[in-house]
Image: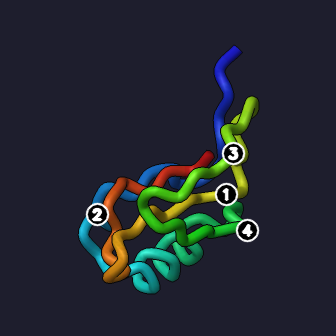
Amino acid sequence: MAFECRGKTSWPELLGVEKEVAKETVERENPYVTDVEIVLEGTIVPADLVPVCTRVRIWVEESGIVTRVPVVG
């Protein structure tokens, strides 16, 4: 059985954008996302066994620019 999250689940247009702009965009475009995490590249985060439909991690470099496509999960 495939796992599906509600609302928009990927934001490729945010690659290279400033972190606060990316965070505001995700929050505005998917009201089901209640936890937007800004994560510095190189940070170790726990792996999830089950997708988390309410969270998006926004990976950034030290200058605050988004380095990976933000996705729900």
Q: Amino acid at mark 2?
A: Leu
Identify the residue under disc 4.
Answer: 34
First in sequence: mark 1 vs mark 3: 3
Q: Report the residue at 51% width, 77% height from top.
A: 23
Query: Alpha-carbon neighbours of circle 4 within 10 Å: few (<14), some, or many (≥20)?
Result: few
Q: Is residue 48 above or below residue 15?
A: above
First in sequence: mark 3 vs mark 2: 2
Q: Report the residue at 73% width, 68% height from top.
A: 34
Marks 1/3: CA–CA distance: 13 Å
Asked if the residues shown at circle 1 and circle 2 are in contact, with their CB atoms under 8 angstroms apart, the answer is no
First in sequence: mark 2 vs mark 4: 2
Local SS, label 1: strand
Marks 3/2: CA–CA distance: 23 Å
Left or right relative to 38: residue 41: left
Q: Quadrant of residue 56?
A: bottom right
Query: Alpha-carbon neighbours of circle 2 within 10 Å: few (<14), some, or many (≥20)?
Result: some
First in sequence: mark 3 vs mark 4: 4
Q: Report the residue at 53% width, 66% height from top.
A: 39
Name the foreground residue: 32 vs 67: 67
Percent position of residue 73, x then y: 62, 46
